[in-house]
Amino acid sequence: MKNQKTIWPGGTQLAPVPVVLVGCGDGKNFKYNCLTVAWAGTLSSNPPMVGIGVRPERYSRGLIESSGVFTVNMPSADLAEKVDYCGVVSGRDVDKFAKCGFTAIAGSKVAAPVIAECPISLECKVRHSLSLGSHILYVGEVVAVQISSEFIDEKNHFDVTKANLLAYAHGNYISLGETLGTFGYSVKKK
Ligand SMILES: Cc1cc2nc3c(=O)[nH]c(=O)nc-3n(C[C@H](O)[C@H](O)[C@H](O)COP(=O)(O)O)c2cc1C
């Protein structure tokens, strides 16, 4: 029957969510790594803050904590397989940058690596961390953004339709579909 609900216990069903490659590492020693993170989101506009949820046992955790910085690299849909790979192997065992053919470029404001192949990357400084249970929430202030110039249009806007960013929903990697409207279009005069 329409609108009849099935009740599940509380869980991680919020979807779709971004799936990102978090770049981390010690810039001085070039000890770079990245891991796939789906528990990520914008938390504040001013100052711009993002949160990432990282399990304490991840190799990346130590790199994030020792450097106090990380990058959030948003992949395009064509990188889905590499995103999955970076989420199932550990930097303890594999050089994921080398294996995936990723180019690590220097952050402009942080030591953590930016993944050149991703259309847009956030450079973040850890401002807070909070243990939530299975995951540690790292709240990072976004101190710079690196965007591949090919996705910036003539009005100096990031063209998200061209970047074809990757989303994640209930275990599935999904590419974004058609644009249905833009911010505030519901109340704008036609
Ligand atoms: C789609 C996907 C989403 C993931 N999301 C998270 C996440 O939000 N937090 C986390 O700690 N691990 C997440 N993981 C698992 C880590 O990416 C994975 O354990 C990775 O191998 C850790 O890398 P590291 O040991 O090099 O740090 C995710 C994996 C996949 C495939």
Image (spheres, helix red, strand yellow):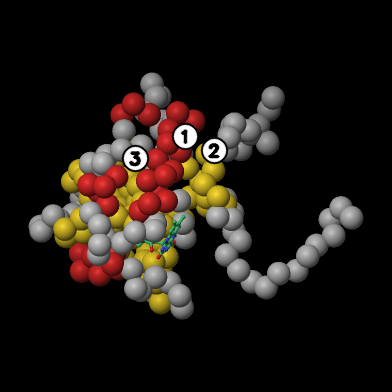
Image x and y of residue 135, in percent? 43, 72
Which corner quadrant holds the N terminus?
bottom right
Q: Is mark 3 within 8 Å of ligand 1?
A: no
Q: Secondary structure at mark 1?
A: loop
Q: Distance between the Cα atoms at labels 2 and 3?
A: 15 Å
Query: Relative to residue 158, is residue 32 drawn left or right?
Result: left
The answer to which of marks 2 and 3 sits earlier in the sequence is 3
Image x and y of residue 57, in percent? 34, 73
Locate residue 179: give its quadrant: top right
Q: Distance between the Cα atoms at labels 1 and 2?
A: 6 Å
Categorize mark 3 by other alpha carbons within 10 Å: few (<14), some (14-19), many (20+).
Answer: many
Image x and y of residue 130, in percent? 39, 74
Determine whether label 2 and label 3 are within 8 Å by CB: no
Residue placed under numbered mark 3 in the picture: 118
Query: Relative to residue 85, is residue 11 drawn left or right?
Result: right
> Which residue is at 45% across, 51% downward?
19
Q: Secondary structure at mark 3?
A: loop
Categorize mark 2 by other alpha carbons within 10 Å: few (<14), some (14-19), many (20+).
Answer: some
Residue placed under numbered mark 1 in the picture: 164
Q: Secondary structure at mark 2?
A: loop
The answer to which of marks 3 and 1 sits earlier in the sequence is 3
Query: Relative to residue 141, is residue 164 drawn left or right?
Result: right
Q: Which mark is residue 176?
A: 2
Up-down relation of residue 90 to residue 163 (above or below) = below
- Count of marks, rendered view: 3
Determine whether label 1 and label 2 are within 8 Å by CB: yes
Q: Amino acid at mark 2?
A: Leu
Which corner quadrant holds the C terminus?
top right
Instruction: Please say whether residue 20 is visible from this viewpoint.
Output: no
Foreground of the two, 111 or 31: 31
